Amino acid sequence: MKALILAAGLGERMRPLTATTPKPLLPAGGKPLIAWHLEKLAAIGVRDVVVNTSWLAEQFPATLGDGGRWGLRLHYSHEGPTPLETGGGMLHALALLGDAPFLAVNGDIWTDYDFARLPTQPAGDAYLVLVDNPPQHPQGDFALRGDRVACEGDARLTFSGIGVYRPGLLGDWRTVIGQAPGVDATPPRFKLAPLLRAAMARDAVGGEYHRGAWTDVGTPERLAQLDHALAAR
């Protein structure tokens, strides 16, 4: 399985730290956030990892190189000066990811979730890992009904930013997204969530609830808290 690390965001909530450093390259526990993912991916046998980039894109190859230190082959999907959002970024990276299901993870999270738990062949278009709602996102995103993920439900959970996707999820993106800002750009810019909700309506999204550690490193304060927690491990 190949993997995609979503690392193209502007990191606006992390200013001033991200004025000079992309958020996934900020250090936590003595190493860049993205390095925690690279280590975990290498440990489960992933060899090819695509990193999508935009803001301060040149810093990624300068810092990470070709991935050889982790036993990986890194490929960079540069999106230009304007990030393509999650859906557009994933679509843009498909040329490097191929036709098989791929693992994708947000570059600005930290978790103890074991990537080896993820299915290599999801039953449906996608498989998502959900977590408890953090204080900054109390409303959650989706509901988990057994091993299926739904848009609506009583006990809503937050999408962790970890999932497995079939490229076919993006096949009919234009019909699902419709007319929205960015869709007519070259390359197109759009969010992934509408495609996931459409797949959920077809009962084509599986998932699980992760009860362990997970942090959305969205502010300097949360980065400092994570760094302190990792230093104490």
Image (tube, grey):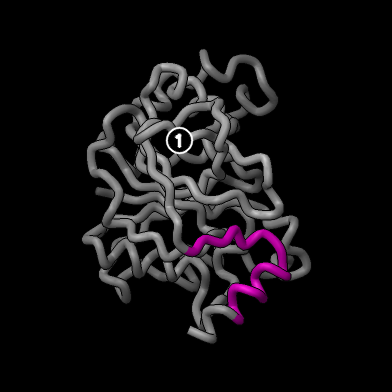
The type of residue carrying mark 1 is: Leu
Q: In this rendering, is residue 79 above or below 152?
A: below
User: Residue drawn 56% across and 76% down?
Assistant: 28
- Picture coordinates of residue 114 (x, y %)? 33, 60
User: Residue drawn 55% across and 31% down?
Assistant: 193
User: Residue drawn 39% across and 27% down?
Assistant: 169
**Image-based side of 33 in relation to 1, left or right:** right
In magenta, the rendered stretch is: 213-228
Furthest residue to the bottom?
232
User: Residue drawn 78% across and 68% down?
Assistant: 16
**Image-based side of 192 in relation to 139, left or right:** left
Furthest residue to the front?
154
Quadrant in the rendering for residue 163: top left
Between 198 and 10, the residue placed more toward the observer is: 198
Q: Is residue 223 magenta?
A: yes
Q: In this rendering, is residue 37 above or below 79?
A: below
**Image-based side of 227 in relation to 212, left or right:** right
Between 110 and 98, the residue placed more toward the observer is: 110
- Picture coordinates of residue 126 (x, y %)? 37, 34
- Picture coordinates of residue 94 (x, y %)? 38, 37
- Name the residue tied to disc 1: 144
- Picture coordinates of residue 62 (x, y %)? 49, 71
Identify the secondary structure beneath mark 1.
Answer: strand
